[in-house]
Image (cartoon, helix red, strand yellow):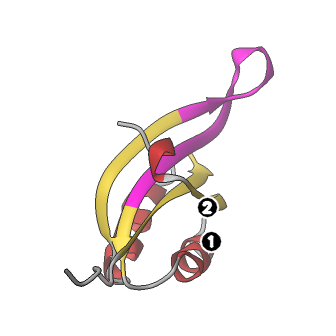
Amino acid sequence: MPRSSRLGFGLRVVYEDGRGVLPDVLARCTDLGFTIERIGAERLEGTGGHPTGEIEVRLELYGTAGREAIADALGDLQGVHEVAATGLADVGD
């Protein structure tokens, strides 16, 4: 059987809460031809359990472009503070 040309990987994106960044992140992923299979998100807490004002979203993506292409594209979005590749097992539900 031939191997699929679609690559799967996890991506962690940290962005500023309350600025409507998540729809832009998801749109950028699909605009670049990625399929989003799973998504998980949580509000980040700093020392003492105080909210940092940031949200961490973990995506499981599949596509023909590499991680670098999507990381660069998401890193350019206003309000995005961090983009990093993760393992697929780190995406969660």
**Number of numbered labels in the structure image:** 2
Q: Does residue 56 show up magenta in the picture?
A: yes
Q: Is residue 50 above or below residue 90?
A: above
Amino acid residing under circle 1: Gly
The picture places residue 79, in percent across and down from the top left corner, at: 61, 60
In the displayed image of the protein, which residue is found farthest to the left? 1
Is label 2 in a helix, a strand or a loop? strand
The picture places residue 26, in percent across and down from the top left corner, at: 37, 64
Helix, strand or loop: magenta stretch: strand
Image quadrant occupied by the C terminus: top left
Q: Which residues are magenta?
A: 43-60
Picture residue at 51% right of the left edge, 76% below the top: 70
* Image quadrant in which you'd find residue 62: bottom left
The answer to whether the residues at label 2 and label 1 have Cβ atoms under 8 Å apart is yes
Amino acid residing under circle 2: Val
Picture residue at 38% right of the left edge, 64% below the top: 61
Image quadrant occupied by the N terminus: bottom left
Picture residue at 41% right of the left edge, 38% below the top: 92
Picture residue at 31% right of the left edge, 75% below the top: 30
The picture places residue 13, in percent across and down from the top left corner, at: 56, 55
Name the mark on residue 80: 2
Name the mark on residue 75: 1
* Image quadrant in which you'd find residue 24: bottom left
Name the mark on residue 86: none
Tell me which numbered mark, 2 or 1, is placed earlier along the sequence.
Answer: 1
Q: Does residue 38 show up magenta in the picture?
A: no
Q: Is residue 56 above or below residue 61?
A: above
Is label 1 in a helix, a strand or a loop? helix
The picture places residue 88, in percent across and down from the top left corner, at: 45, 52
Counting other residues with Cα less than 10 Å from the Cα at mark 1, is it few (<14), some (14-19), or many (20 or more)? some
